[in-house]
Amino acid sequence: MPDPWQESDVPRGAAYDRRFHELASAGVDVHGEAALVDSYGPGPVLDAGCGTGRVAMELSRRGHVVVGVDVDPAMLDAARAKAPGLSWVEGDLTDPDFDPGRTFDTVVMAGNVLIFVPPGTEGRAIANAARWLVPGGRLVTGYSIRPGGFGPPAHDALAARSGLALEDRWSTWDRRPFAPPGRYAVSVHRREA
């Protein structure tokens, strides 16, 4: 099965971080994901597909208990080096046996996580996220939409199968309105109580 993350040319570790340092230096707000999650006032947050930890660290700075999970050890090494006091777990979000060890008010999948899992496993990642949420908890995702690729209709159907209902959708993390077909989707699905 193809693995879009492993086959991608996305920089890893410090090289990945460099892009966000350059954006921040240019005055770009690189914490939109954390700001959106924070606006819902959650308790514990799982940063699923945490990469080098940018979102998890900002959520922690804002006072949230955060656990970061990623499948890529190089990305986790960078996260651990920057924030050794946070909990970083190596795990596959699509593995039905993976257990992060607790439940969460919010699971956030920023940074195109759902388009980097192997095609056909998006439903497993969403089902796992739903399983890790407390009743009433939220799954918050953001990803690029490409013609013929994973997008909101499939996402909503898979979420519904896992007991999640669409609560909000935007085209950006700063809540610009979403209009199909769109190039990016930020979706908030809520687990039924």
Image (cartoon, rainbow, N blue to C red):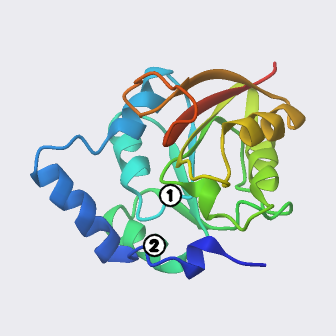
Toward the viewer: 66 or 28? 28
Extreme residue toward the right, this view: 161
- Secondary structure beneath dot 2 equals helix
Residue occupying image coordinates x 38% and y 72%: 78
Toward the viewer: 49 or 116? 116
- Secondary structure beneath dot 1 equals loop
**For the residue carrying disc 2, how many other residues have a C-alpha within 10 Å: few (<14), some (14-19), or many (20+)?**
many
Q: Is residue 193 left or right of residue 47?
A: right
State the separation of the CA atoms marked 2 and 1. 8 Å
Residue occupying image coordinates x 55% and y 51%: 67
Extreme residue toward the left, this view: 26
- The quarter of the image holding the N terminus is bottom right
Task: Tell me residue 116's x, y (percent).
Answer: 60, 64
**Which residue position is annotated with label 2?**
75
Q: Is residue 129 left or right of residue 185?
A: right
- The quarter of the image holding the C terminus is top right
Task: Tell me residue 149's x, y (percent).
Answer: 66, 55
Q: Is residue 20 above or below residue 133?
A: below
**For the residue carrying disc 1, how many other residues have a C-alpha within 10 Å: few (<14), some (14-19), or many (20+)?**
many
Residue occupying image coordinates x 73% and y 45%: 129
**Which residue position is annotated with label 1?**
50
Toward the viewer: 143 or 137? 143
Q: Is residue 135 above or below residue 12?
A: above
Q: Amino acid at mark 1?
A: Cys
Q: Earlier in the sequence, mark 2 or mark 1?
A: 1
Q: Amino acid at mark 2?
A: Met
Task: Tell me residue 163's x, y (percent).
Answer: 85, 30
- The image shows a total of numbered marks equal to 2
Label 1 near label 2: C-beta < 8 Å? yes
Residue occupying image coordinates x 70% and y 55%: 100
Q: Quadrant of residue 82?
A: bottom left
